[in-house]
Amino acid sequence: MARKRSVTGRAQPDNRSSYIVTALARGLAVLNAFGPERYELSLRDLADAAGVTPASAFRIGFTLIEAGYVIRNPVTKGYRLGPRALSIGIETLSAMTLTEIAAPYLVALRDRTNETVKLAIPTGLQVVVVARVPSLSYPTMTNYIGAQMPATISSLGRAVLAWETTELMTSVLSKTKSLRLTPKTLPKPQLREELETTRKRGYAVNDQGTTMEHRSVGAPLLASSGHPIGAVNVSVSAQRISMAELKRRIAPEVVQTAADISRVLPPEVQGAGRLGVSV
């Protein structure tokens, strides 16, 4: 048993484990075993998740069914999340803003890549950075919270624009002035082709188009309607990480994070944005 020091300096047992309600912990372990790719669990799955015998797992499953947190599939005899579990999740998420929902995912992405992560929402013809998780090893002051930039320039903006309707995309491109921030900023005539490529590959890239020191990769946050309401990106030093490594190692992480956030968004999440619309 782990031990801790008392005020006298003597080692004493750590009794925190004595406060744990084992049966409750096992029930929660069962609920945590459900996921997007595991929407139905067998009795064996329940037993493995709770670390108990099938007989004990059956009792846990029965208790969760009676409480409304789990239902039983009459055909397969498998277990699925019930209305009570689903309603708690929906009610909780509905009360949270986009940045609050995304926060743990952004931190996890930063920890996996060890790079700076940002979240932006579209407004008008621009995107606005609303959350930022700096790298612990390579901190940078670029793109602080509140920073705005045209949607056509950064990976955050193009990750939104590429998933918009053709009509809105055309409107944004026609209304956005040509802007050349660096020698590598994409010229306006090349933007439509770049947006088409972006959507096909599933993520946007910005190779030193906003500053010569950085390149980035971004992916869209999609509402249940399919409209982009924001974007997540990872920004890296152009001296440390090549475009090839950015696409190979970091892009899949960004795409997965954006998909994970999108999956849990309520229909009318607070703090979402839309291009071409003032918010």
Image (tube, grey):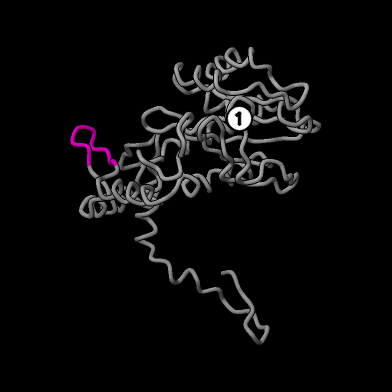
Magenta segment includes 213: no
Instruction: Give the vertical position of 41 relative to 2 (above or below).
Output: above
Kindly identify the residue that appears in the image at 37 percent across and 56 percent down.
26
Of helix, strand and loop, which one carries label 1?
strand
How many numbered discs sit on the rendered protein?
1
Question: Viewed as shown, does residue 120 lie left or right of 46?
Answer: right
Instruction: Give the vertical position of 156 relative to 115 (above or below).
Output: above
Picture quarter with the N terminus: bottom right
Q: Position of residue 77 (x, y in %)?
A: 23, 37
Question: Viewed as shown, does residue 261 lie left or right of 180?
Answer: left
Q: Position of residue 211 (x, y in %)?
A: 75, 31
Question: Could you say which quadrant of the image residue 129 lies in?
Answer: top right
Q: What range is drawn magenta here?
A: 72-80
Magenta segment includes 78: yes
Question: Viewed as shown, does residue 14 lie left or right of 80?
Answer: right
Kindly identify the residue that appears in the image at 34 percent across and 37 percent down.
39
Q: Residue furthest bottom?
A: 8
Q: Position of residue 141 (x, y in %)?
A: 72, 45
Characterize the local packing of mark 1: few (<14), some (14-19) or many (20 or more) Cα atoms within 10 angstroms.
many
Callout 1, which amino acid?
Pro
Instruction: Give the vertical position of 122 relative to 60 (above or below).
Output: above
Question: Viewed as shown, does residue 90 lie left or right of 147?
Answer: left
Task: State the residue in front, 166 or 5.
Answer: 166
Q: Residue furthest left?
A: 74
> How would you classify the magenta stretch by its main secondary structure?
loop
Q: Position of residue 38 (x, y in %)?
A: 38, 36
Kindly identify the residue that appears in the image at 56 percent across and 44 percent down.
130
Residue position for label 1: 150
